[in-house]
Image (tube, coloured by chain):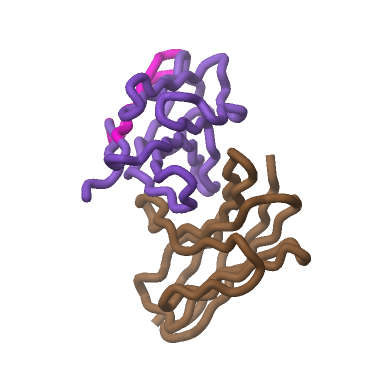
Amino acid sequence: GQSLEQPSEVTAVEGAIVQINCTYQTSGFYGLSWYQQHDGGAPTFLSYNALDGLEETGRFSSFLSRSDSYGYLLLQELQMKDSASYFCCLHNFNKFYFGSGTKLNVKP
Amino acid sequence: EAGVAQSPRYKIIEKRQSVAFWCNPISGHATLYWYQQILGQGPKLLIQFQNNGVVDDSQLPKDRFSAERLKGVDSTLKIQPAKLEDSAVYLCASSLPDSETQYFGPGTRLLVL
């Protein structure tokens, strides 16, 4: 399977901006998605990049660089409710590969 | 709009027993996925259906796992016999064809003793 690398844990304060990186080793894939999962909850879709560049959805933005084999999720104006795990997901033909997830801790 | 439904929510069994999970996707979603999520890891795709046909099952341990979606709507995932390492959350997701957005159900938490 594909290997996607994410930092295991990130801590930030309320109101700040945080970037969660995702690096991968593949080529020729369709795109990269991001999902949020609260403890004990189901993953929920946040964003998708099919092309290089930045996709903005409210406080969340996602970026993809195929030439650098990495993407990131940018969360602005952090709120306490953003404390959750964030997963990147690579769509390669009929297969979907999730990273191991980054646990975001938002502190007051 | 109703979300993806799964049952049971929790299941505790002993190793070598069998277990089955049920999923009802969002109405109109032709694509259905089963994932296994081990604690502290990301979801791992086990099988993907398009209507009632299998699109990909390359990561499904076929010696013990089976899945079906007979009428192109509900789906069941079965484990027989279960092993200790099968302890995980089993997530069902659905999507519209050619959509990148997957909608996940609440999952079934399986503990194998």
Residue B113 visible in the shown view: no
Instruction: Work out which residue is located at the far left of the displayed protein and give it.
Output: B1
Q: Quadrant of residue A19?
A: bottom right
For chain A, what colour was chosen? brown
Does the magenta-highlighted stretch encompass residue A94? no
Q: Residue at x 41, y 25 (%)?
A: B52
Q: Residue at x 58, y 74 (%)?
A: A54
Q: Which chain is purple?
A: B
Q: Say above or below: B110 vs A43.
A: above
Seen at 49% across and 36% down, the residue is B36
Residue A100 horizontal/vertical position (percent): 58, 52
Residue at the image point whose x is 51% and y is 30% from the top: B47
In this image, B86 relative to A5: left or right? Answer: left
Quadrant (top left, top right, bottom left, bottom right) of the C terminus of chain B: top left
x, y percent for residue A16: 48, 85
Q: Residue B19: x percent and y percent?
A: 37, 20
Q: In this view, which residue lies farthest toward the bottom? A: A15
Instruction: Indicate the position of residue B85 as horizontal and vertical percent values.
Output: 53, 28
Above or below, comparing residue A85 to residue B66 in the picture: below
Q: Is residue A17 above or below residue B30?
A: below
Front residue of A5/B54: it is B54
Instruction: Please give left or right for residue A95 compared with residue B70 in the image.
Output: right
**Number of callouts in the render?**
0
Q: Magenta residues?
A: B8-24
* Residue B19 magenta: yes
Visible residue check, residue A81: yes
Res B33 → quadrant: top left
* A5 and A67: which is toward the camera: A67
